[in-house]
Image (cartoon, grey):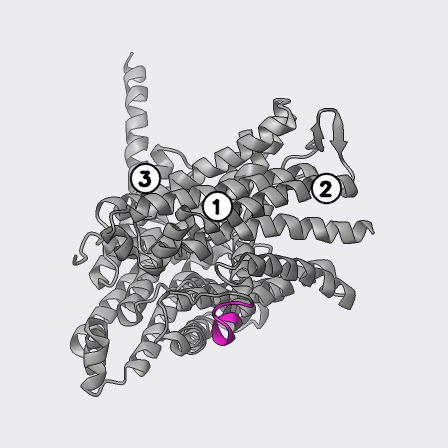
Amino acid sequence: MADRSIFCLLPLFIMRAMLTQIIFNGLIAGSAYSLIALGYTMIYGVGRLINFAHGELYMGAAYCFFLFYIQLDWNIYSSFFGAILIGALLGIALERIAYRPFKESSRLIPLITTIGASTFLKAVAILFFGVQAKTLLKYAYFQPSFDFLGATLTPVQGYTLISSLGLMALLALVLKRTRFGKAIRATAEDRISASHLGIDTDEVTSITFAIGGLLAAVAGILVGYDQNITPTMGILAGFKGFTAAVLGGIGNIPGAVIGGFCIGLAENLGAAYLSSANKDSISFAILLLILLFKPSGILGKK
Amino acid sequence: MGYLFNILILGGLFSILSVSLNIACGYTGILSLAHASFYGVGAYTVGLLTTKMGVPFWTAFLLGGVFAGICGLLIGIPTLRLKGDYFLIATLGFGEIFSKSLINWDTLTEGARGITNIPPIQILGIRFDTDFSFFFFLLLIWIICVGSIYLIEKSPFGQILFSIAEDEDGVAALGRNPTYFKVLAMGLSAFWAGIAGGLYASYVGYINPNLFTINESILIFTMVLLGGLRSIHGVILGAFVLVALPELMRFIGLPGPFAAVIRQMIYGMLLILIMYFRPRGLLGRVKLR
């Protein structure tokens, strides 16, 4: 009898341990979504554009890391910084080609050009690296894992969480405390008045795209290192980042962070308790629900 | 000769898709990237009903259109109150999740293997199983589709759609509910996509989830923008041009998988170039708003 009662309790322990694990998985996925959502939100704030090619910046940087780290055999730091630099440069190029020439015309035109850019970048990735999934691990061994508050994490998952929180804090600091951050906030507030006050709004937009590209690049490399990379990895990641930005209130920076973590948690909890095959549909359901009931998002203004 | 019919058939199918997408994009001004999903709903309806349940072609074919239309309405109702850019990304998410579900839901859809041995069209004992006979069947459906959409363009309903594209608030001020008409346009557009899907499934006899991804949606979208929003002639031309493009590349002698990638690159560049040089498309009459 005694043995039995212990066995009855066992599932409860397992459930609790699993729940911590699920929450950590959610936070790790969520931190990547937050980084992507920050880019969407900042670009939307400054340029009133939903950047369709944002997921491709995420994917492109992961492939650049693959090129530097695996194919050219650079060390991990220079590959990492090289790849996020390329992410930022891709952001700038995207702004020059697909946004700046059309900023005066209908809002739908830059949407279409960024769809074009996204299609193009995906095709370039397939052309050079093929459609098969690639691993970013240099040596084929099991990643050592460690226990943290009852959850098992790999080092790269730990780095993902720490570095994204660090980047978010840094971004908040830049936006709040520096002159340049002030210029971004002013442009987002009112583009015309900002330019009358002598702010070079084109320059600000361009750098905002670069920041967005950089954040997406960090997310892409870290997630790619943890999982694998494919040329289509950017589509769903971009969509979920966008959902996170809308959930938090598009244009709102703290909102993007909160939204990202919410999506990550909802997705992992939903996959564990509802249906793991439909994990990706959860973010779509969330997007529809927010847009129906509170289109301004959690922190957004009317 | 068979080769020529092959291209004509593909062009015909894709022009049904582009003409129907034009109802949403061109007439009503709602840009959608879920068109390949509706096309897929029609194809999978015909594929599953005819192979697994032995339903006769006609029933499955019409049901495919109806199911796709219902999907269009269901997607449209929550999302069409959104502004254009939000709507566009919502359809993108739907399209991506739809093609993932075709792979994941493999008890129903056979997953990535796809559905094989879909029987050719058979009506009243007549089999349309050669390129030549299928072409005439397609031509019949094509005329009904393009003709009915032409009539819609000229009808009061079409005029309301046009005015929604021009000035949605104005339409609301005149006492019409723009969302209602946008949802109807979306349903109608999805219906014809489903019909094209059913035709494709029974023409080729084999479908898999790769045929209904976001890339296909972008292809149809490019056809509409290339041809010109709101112009029936234009979008038919756009469909034929983009169907003929890979054939031209075959003449140059590019190997198959490589050509597929180059094609995607061309579609991407084309979207940007159209917006640079001719935002209204080849034969289009209206500017994007």
**The quadrant where residue B31 appears:** bottom left
| Residue A60 in picture, x, y percent from top left | 49, 66
Q: Which of pointers 3 and 1 indicates the residue nearer the eye?
A: 1
- Quadrant showing the C terminus of chain B: bottom left
Q: Residue at x 28, y 43 (%)?
A: A289
Whether label 3 touches label 2, CB < 8 Å: no
On the image, numbered disc 1 is attached to which residue?
B189
Q: Which of pointers 3 and 2 indicates the residue nearer the eye?
A: 2
Q: Which of pointers 1 and 2 indicates the residue nearer the eye?
A: 2
| Residue A77 in picture, x, y percent from top left | 43, 72
Vertical placement of residue B205 versus A256, above or below: above
Residue type at the position of mark 1:
Ser
Stretch of the chain drawn in magenta: B274-282
Q: Residue at x 44, y 66 (%)?
A: A114
Tag of residue A269: 3
On the image, numbered disc 2 is attached to which residue?
B136
Farthest residue, direction right:
B1
Kind of element beneath mark 2: helix
Residue type at the position of mark 3:
Leu
Q: Is residue B279 magenta?
A: yes
